[in-house]
């Protein structure tokens, strides 16, 4: 019985994971290839008539996906860059200083892992600063939201880096900024890859904060653009176009995840355990 449970438990976990993830993916994939008449009530049946090419073409054209794609890039890429640079700089200080003030600042910074952002406060502050309904405002929100995660992982990783490397550089006359850019930052590549992928995955699919900060219009990101199109009833009862939009929107992040999945595991292990 013990042997059966030992070998059956992994199979059970894989089966449950396949059902939880595979069934929704299958529903989206097959519905995106159906004509409108078959997709009115989405189900798991294979299409009787396949038309994925026309569905995807209509989703890209009618849904203005190219504009949404550009808007998402203009928001997500600067957010990732800021999260990495600011997170690495703060983590270096937190990892090398041991005063009570630094410890308190570190606890305050990583508190963002547990405390959700207050949307009303964020919107009011952005209005006071003149950043409401702007891309810089959205970039600032994403940077503040995901900076805690970056600091948490990078601090743990930097603490495992031998101090002798930095001390040797100081003896050779290197300035703190040179040590950071030439020694510390290159050693953070596994954690940087992890933070990059995680922030991109979260920000790329976000619609909640984008709705309150950007408000839609010509600056709408891909998920927000889909919401606007659906709200305007352009996709009314057109589930085949909705799911085709979702498939195309997800492809860049699927590619990023497949390329960097090993980095995610190694970066999380290095940052959290070391």
Image (spheres, helix red, strand yellow):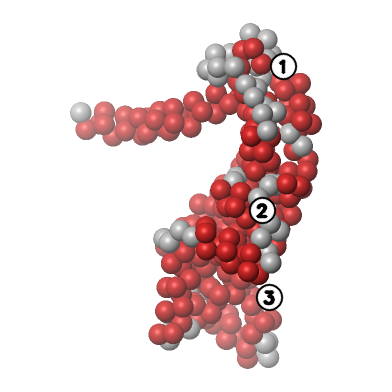
- 10 Å neighbourhood of mark 2: few (<14), some, or many (≥20)? many
Q: Helix or strand or loop: what does disc 2 sit on?
A: loop
Residue 133 or residue 176, whichever sits in front: 133
Please tell me which of labels 1 and 3 falls first in the chain: 1
The residue that label 1 is drawn on is 51
In the figure, is residue 272 to the left or right of 249? left
Taking 13 as reference, is 220 above or below it?
Answer: below
Taking 248 as reference, is 76 above or below it?
Answer: below
The residue that label 3 is drawn on is 182
Please tell me which of labels 2 and 3 falls first in the chain: 3
Residue 263 or residue 130, whichever sits in front: 130
How many numbered marks, from 0 up? 3
* Residue plotted at (66% across, 60% down): 132
Residue 172 or residue 92, whichever sits in front: 92
Give the image location of residue 127, x and y in percent: 63, 64
Taking 89 as reference, is 136 above or below it?
Answer: above
Q: Quadrant of residue 251?
A: top right
Q: Helix or strand or loop: what does disc 1 sit on?
A: loop
């Amino acid at each position: 019985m013990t042997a059966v449970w030992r070998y059956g438990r992994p199979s059970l976990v894989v089966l449950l994971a396949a059902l939880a993830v595979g069934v929704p993916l299958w529903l989206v994939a097959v519905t995106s290839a159906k004509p409108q008449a078959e997709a009115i009530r989405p189900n798991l049946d294979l299409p009787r008539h396949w038309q994925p090419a026309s569905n995807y073409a209509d989703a890209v054209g009618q849904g203005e996906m190219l504009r949404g794609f550009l808007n998402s890039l203009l928001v997500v890429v600067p957010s990732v860059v800021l999260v990495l640079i600011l997170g690495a700089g703060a983590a270096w200080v937190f990892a090398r200083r041991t005063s009570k003030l630094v410890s308190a600042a570190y606890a305050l910074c990583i508190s963002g892992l547990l405390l959700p952002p207050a949307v009303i406060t964020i919107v009011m502050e952005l209005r006071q600063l003149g950043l409401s309904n702007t891309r810089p405002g959205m970039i600032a929100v994403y940077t503040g939201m995901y900076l805690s995660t970056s600091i948490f992982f990078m601090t743990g990783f930097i603490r495992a880096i031998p101090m002798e490397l930095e001390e040797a550089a100081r003896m050779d006359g290197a300035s703190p900024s040179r040590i950071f850019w030439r020694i510390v930052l290159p050693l953070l590549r596994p954690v940087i890859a992890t933070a990059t992928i995680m922030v991109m995955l979260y920000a790329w699919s976000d619609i909640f904060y984008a709705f309150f900060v950007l408000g839609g219009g010509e600056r709408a990101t891909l998920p927000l653009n889909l919401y606007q199109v659906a709200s305007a009833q352009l996709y009314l009862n057109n589930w085949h176009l909705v799911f085709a939009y979702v498939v195309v929107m997800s492809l860049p992040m699927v590619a990023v995840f497949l390329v960097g999945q090993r980095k995610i595991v190694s970066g999380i292990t290095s940052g959290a355990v070391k």
